[in-house]
Each structure stands twice: as structure tokens, then as C-alpha cells.
Image (cartoon, rainbow, N blue to C red):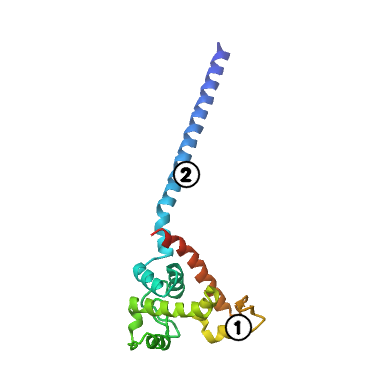
Amino acid sequence: MAGSGRKRRARQQRLRRISLMTTAAVLALALLGLVVWLVFARAPGLIMRRYPMDYEATVRQYATEYTLEPAYVAGVILAESDFDAQAVSSANAQGLMQLLPATAEWIAGKLDETYVEGCLFDPETNIRYGCWYLGFLMRRYGGDKRCASSAYHQGQGTVDKWLQNPEYATDGQLTVIPSNATNTYVQRVLKYYEKYQKLYANT
């Protein structure tokens, strides 16, 4: 009888351990499910904070007008100002697309407009001028985003010199961007462009 009691108690203890282990496993799975749900629930908001789409209608409007992809324009804006319409660089580049007043005045002339000081802090004007300039650079460099982005950052004259140097270019294609700052900038623009291609396709 004593032996039978010990066996019964041992069996009950095993059952309790199994029950506790099962309960723990269920709770762990529930917790994991909650974590996964929270991650996916927050993902769209996190993505939109990292890749904002402010001024989307304006970006789309002027990208279309100047034969550009909205995703490319958005990538330039993110790289240039992080969508801060009041941004000013140490070189006095201004607004969303960080145009220099001298460049903006030249663009205004091309558009038969009079440049007005401070206009680059107006998002629509800044995006319109910036898209015109990007479109100009894309045509100048045959639709090559690496060249156009490099020229946007470093200037047309510098990029033209790079293209004439066999150390940096082959058959009119920029194979090496010799400026670390410009190379980093271009890589960021192209990375953002790829991300915005997906975001703009979903809106």
C-alpha cells in the first residue's frame, strides 16, 4: 500500500509539473504574439516618421511637371533637409530642397520670374524650383541619378570635370565619386529613393 501511495504522489507531481510547463509555454507564446502584434501595429507609424511624406501633393505635382519621379524628389528632400521647410545650411542653402539664393535666382530667370528674397522658405516655391533644377540636371546627365544627384550636391562644373577624368568615369558614366561627402550624399539619396518608391506606390 505504501508503495502504491508513493507512486500515486509521484504521478501527481509529474502531472503538476507538466501542467505548469504547459501553462508557462502558453503564456510565453501569448507574450510573443503580443510583441509581434505591437511591432507590426507600430511599423507603419515608425516608417512614416523615418520617411515622411509631407507636401506629397506638391511633390507629385512638380515632379510630374518636370518629368521626375516623386520618389526621387522625396529622397532628395529627405537627404537635404529632413523635410524641414525652414532649414538653412552653413552655406546658406535654404528650405526643403536646400537651394542657394544665387541658384534660385538663376532658376527664377529661366522661368521668367523675379526672384524674391525669402521665397525659398515657402514650401511650394522651394519644391517647384528644386524640381525644375533636378529636371534640368537629369536631362543634362541623360537621366543618370548618380550624376544628377552628385551635381545637385557638388555643382555641375565639378561633376563635368569628374566625367572627363578616366580615373572617375568610363564612357560618360561616373564610376567613382571622389568626394566622400558627395558619395555619402548620393548613396543616401538613392537609398531614400528606393524606400519612397514603395511608399509612393502605396498612396
Q: Which residue shows up at 54% across the image and 25% down it? A: 14
Label 1 sits on residue = 162
Amino acid at dot 2:
Leu
Front residue of 177/41: it is 177
The N terminus lies in quadrant: top right
Q: Are marks 1 and 2 in contact (CB under 8 Å)?
A: no
Amino acid at dot 1:
Trp
**Marks 1/2: CA–CA distance:** 53 Å
At numbered mark 2, what does the secondary structure look like: helix, strand or loop? helix
**40 relative to 77, above or below:** above
Residue 24, x across and y down, in percent: 48, 36
Label 2 sits on residue = 32
> Is residue 197 in view?
yes
Residue 66, x across and y down, in percent: 41, 75
66 relative position to 175: left or right: left
Residue 106, x across and y down, in percent: 41, 88
Quadrant assignment, res 182: bottom right
Q: Counting other residues with Cα less than 10 Å from the Cα at mark 1, is it few (<14), some (14-19), or many (20 or more)?
A: many
Q: Counting other residues with Cα less than 10 Å from the Cα at mark 2, is it few (<14), some (14-19), or many (20 or more)?
A: few
Front residue of 84/29: it is 84
Residue at the far top: name it. Answer: 1
At numbered mark 1, what does the secondary structure look like: helix, strand or loop? helix
Count of numbered labels shown in the rendering: 2
Front residue of 81/58: it is 58
Residue 199, x across and y down, in percent: 43, 61
Please give the label number shown on residue 65. Answer: none
Front residue of 177/85: it is 177
The C terminus lies in quadrant: bottom left
> Is residue 83 in view?
no
Q: Which residue shows up at 51% across the image and 77% down it? A: 148
**104 relative to 43, above or below:** below
Quadrant assignment, res 164: bottom right
